[in-house]
Image (cartoon, grey):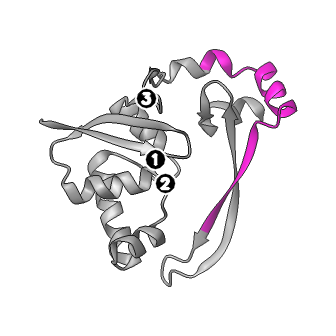
């Protein structure tokens, strides 16, 4: 399968993410992926691209299926594990590859969780809940994310079972 290089500058972090996407990803899909990676919501993208949120949501669903991304929650994890992107600092001097899943096992210990609690590394993330039939906001869920100072976001499935 052919592939194409894809780069996105993430201003919030001062880094560029470089990965190779399947050649079947169109220019329109690359733009959508870029905007999603930059943290834009479906509503913001629909305003930016002058399309309905429903259209953007449908395009996003198709893109996620094509790239093997399970959901918004697993977005970054799926990108990193499937496409192993290169992370380049704003100066271009530091280049890092994402660590594989095995790395988490030696840092996620009861002691690491206790230290993370002391250092306020667990952050609440609010996720809206919409009615599937009407699209009306019906509530929200509060999720927990571990923002580790050295490795970044640690997926919940890597620490919640141990924390429980």
Residues packed near mark 2 inside 10 Å, few (<14), some (14 to 19) or many (20 plus): some
Label 1–label 3 contact, CB within 8 A? no
User: Which quadrant, please, contains the C terminus?
Assistant: top right
Residue at point 47%, 22% (across, down): 100
Residues packed near mark 3 inside 10 Å, few (<14), some (14 to 19) or many (20 plus): some
Label 2–label 3 contact, CB within 8 A? no
Tell which circle, 2 or 3, labels the residue nearer the N-terminal end.
2
Extreme residue in the left direction: 2
- Frontmost residue, 145 versus 131: 145
Residue 70 in the image, given as x and y percentages of width and height: 42, 49
Residue at point 53%, 50% (across, down): 73
Q: Which residue is mark 1?
A: 75
- The magenta stretch is 105-128
Q: Nearer the viewer, mark 1 or mark 3?
A: 3
Label 2–label 1 contact, CB within 8 A? yes
Extreme residue in the right direction: 118
* Disc 2, SS: loop
Residue at point 84%, 27% (across, down): 114
């Amino acid at each position: 399968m052919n592939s194409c290089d894809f780069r996105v500058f993430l201003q919030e972090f001062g880094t560029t993410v470089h990965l190779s996407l399947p050649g079947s990803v169109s220019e329109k899909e690359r733009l959508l992926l870029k905007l999603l990676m930059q943290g834009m919501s479906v509503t913001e993208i629909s305003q930016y691209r002058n399309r309905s949120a429903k259209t953007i949501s449908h395009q996003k669903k198709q893109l996620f299926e094509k790239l093997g991304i399970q959901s918004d929650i697993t977005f970054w994890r799926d990108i990193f594990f499937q496409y192993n992107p290169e992370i380049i600092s704003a100066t271009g001097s530091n280049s890092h590859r994402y660590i594989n899943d095995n790395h988490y096992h030696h840092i996620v210990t009861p002691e690491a969780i206790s230290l993370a609690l002391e250092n306020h590394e667990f952050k609440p993330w609010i996720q809206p809940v919409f009615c599937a039939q009407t699209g009306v906001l019906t509530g929200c869920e509060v999720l927990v994310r571990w923002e580790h100072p050295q490795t970044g976001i640690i997926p919940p499935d890597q620490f919640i079972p141990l924390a429980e």
